[in-house]
């Protein structure tokens, strides 16, 4: 089979980033191609098209019950999902580092219907078509240095033997990979969760040389379900996702950056999320925080810009005690307000925030450790480590990660 033309490779990436069905690339100048592109454009909604309706796919619901280890694996009936890991690390001298590794799965069409029904989800006969597309990101930061890499792969809805798949996820045993970037379970204890112990390995090379990491993660707390038993609402209209986390990882291992291999340790947070319509059509992006507080509590909060009552922002989150008990946080439970801005790769982004939680008697200042954490990937965004202090006294209160999209 001949490799795809540059135009088809471009269409492949566009298909991965578009949440609409993606058929074979039309020939240049074809009327059907122009019309299909116009239809796709008219269907796009919200940041990265995550507010499109998702007709023909399964949808997240408060009635859905999470089941483990099955839900650690893929959900091909849903349009999009991810396995998202961030970590606050430090070397033997106490210098901070940050890392991110994410694997995204994107369905290109709903499951084919039974005979006699409509043609939504009809199989694509193009030799380069795929009904599941994969994208992986890795990032490693130290001081002013911020290294980013991105990879893509095609896949199929029906699983193939691991050796035949460039990318994929299995639940038994848990393994998530794209090429040689791998997140694998080390859990062997009877009754242990597959995500209790993990090994992460990834490396890349750019014009500045190789960079990467090999990290062992061990959880000292339980999995955490967000929202209503794992359903995390994202707008006043009811859109949302199935969403749980493992926020209790201790990390050890090494990273390599600019020709130097460094032993590191720290804390990590894994997010698992899947949906077919994550946002409402008018939501333009989000500001998402995962925080490890010095008290032993964990905190996840987000602000979705738009989608709230009276066109306000939509706020939600989870307060997690040191032993893993979760209290959902709604719009009335906290305030989250930008305090200062900076420019990152030409984008003006908030880099200091005020977070107030009256029920926890906390008023926190959250500050990006460095402003230049722009992820110049196919869907660009900001992602970086933050420090947490008491807003009044300035005393340290913790650390974490912040992701910002749509800027």
Image (cartoon, rainbow, N blue to C red):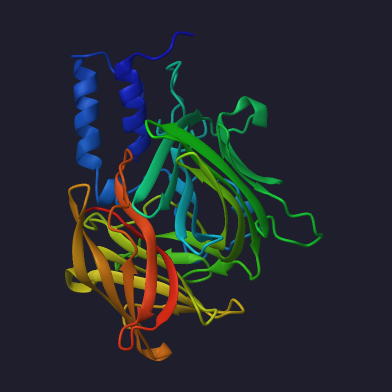
Pick the residue in front: 256 or 24.
256
| Residue 85 visible | yes
**Residue drawn at (24%, 53%), measured in percent from left and top?**
406
In the displayed image of the protein, which residue is found farthest to the top? Answer: 2
Q: Residue at x 29, y 68 (%)?
A: 236
Number of marks in picture? 0
Q: Which x, y percent locates residue 51?
A: 29, 52
Q: Residue at x 58, y 79 (%)?
A: 322
Residue 214 vs residue 268, the one in the foreground: 214
Q: Position of residue 25 (x, y in %)?
A: 32, 20
Q: Report whether residue 64 is seen.
A: no
The quadrant holding residue 8 is: top left
Asked if residue 109 is positioned above or below residue 69 in the image, the reply reads: above
Side of 261 where 40 appears, left or right: left
Residue at the image position 30 percent from the left and 88 percent from the top: 392
Left or right side of 193 for 359: left
Q: Taking 240 as reference, is 52 left or right?
A: left
Place of residue 48 in the rendered image (x, y in percent of width and height, measured from the top left): 29, 46
Q: Is residue 28 above or below residue 182?
A: above
In the image, is 383 to the left or to the right of 153? left
Q: Position of residue 164 (x, y in %)?
A: 63, 25
* Residue furthest front as drawn: 93
Q: Is residue 162 above or below residue 251?
A: above
């Amino acid at each position: 089979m001949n490799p795809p033309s540059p135009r088809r490779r471009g269409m492949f990436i566009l298909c991965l980033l578009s949440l609409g069905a993606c058929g074979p690339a039309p020939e240049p100048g074809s009327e059907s191609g122009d019309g299909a592109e116009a239809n796709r454009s008219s269907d796009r909604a919200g940041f990265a098209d995550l507010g499109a309706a998702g007709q023909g796919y399964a949808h997240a619901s408060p009635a859905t019950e999470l089941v483990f280890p099955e839900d650690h694996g893929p959900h091909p009936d849903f349009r999009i999902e991810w396995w998202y890991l961030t970590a606050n690390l430090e070397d033997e001298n106490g210098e901070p580092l940050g890392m991110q590794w994410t694997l995204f799965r994107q369905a290109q069409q709903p499951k084919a219907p039974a005979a006699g029904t409509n043609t939504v989800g009809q199989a694509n006969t193009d030799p380069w078509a795929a009904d599941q597309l994969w994208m992986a990101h890795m990032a490693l930061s130290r001081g002013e240095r911020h290294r980013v890499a991105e990879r893509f792969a095609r896949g199929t809805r029906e699983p193939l033997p691991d050796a035949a798949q460039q990318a994929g996820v299995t639940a038994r045993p848990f393994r998530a990979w794209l090429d040689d970037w791998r997140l694998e379970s080390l859990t062997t204890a009877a009754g242990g969760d597959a995500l209790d112990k993990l090994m992460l390995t990834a490396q890349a090379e750019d014009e500045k040389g190789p960079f990467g990491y090999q990290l062992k993660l061990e959880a000292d707390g339980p999995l955490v379900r967000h929202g209503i038993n794992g359903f995390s609402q994202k707008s006043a209209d009811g859109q949302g996702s199935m969403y749980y986390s493992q926020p209790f990882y201790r990390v050890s291992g090494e990273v390599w950056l600019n020709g130097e291999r460094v032993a590191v340790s720290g804390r990590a947070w894994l997010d698992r999320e899947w949906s077919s319509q994550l946002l409402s059509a008018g939501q333009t992006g989000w500001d998402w925080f995962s925080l490890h507080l010095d008290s032993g509590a964990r905190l996840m909060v987000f602000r979705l810009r738009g989608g709230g009552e009276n066109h306000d922002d939509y706020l939600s989150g989870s307060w997690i005690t040191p032993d893993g008990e979760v209290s959902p946080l709604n719009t009335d439970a906290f305030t989250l307000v930008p305090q200062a801005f900076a420019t990152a790769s030409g984008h003006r982004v908030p880099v200091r925030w005020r977070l107030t939680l009256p029920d926890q008697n906390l008023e926190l200042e959250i500050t990006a450790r460095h402003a230049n954490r722009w992820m110049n990937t196919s869907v660009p965004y900001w992602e970086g480590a933050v420090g947490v202090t008491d807003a009044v006294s300035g005393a340290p209160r913790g650390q974490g990660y912040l992701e910002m999209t749509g800027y």
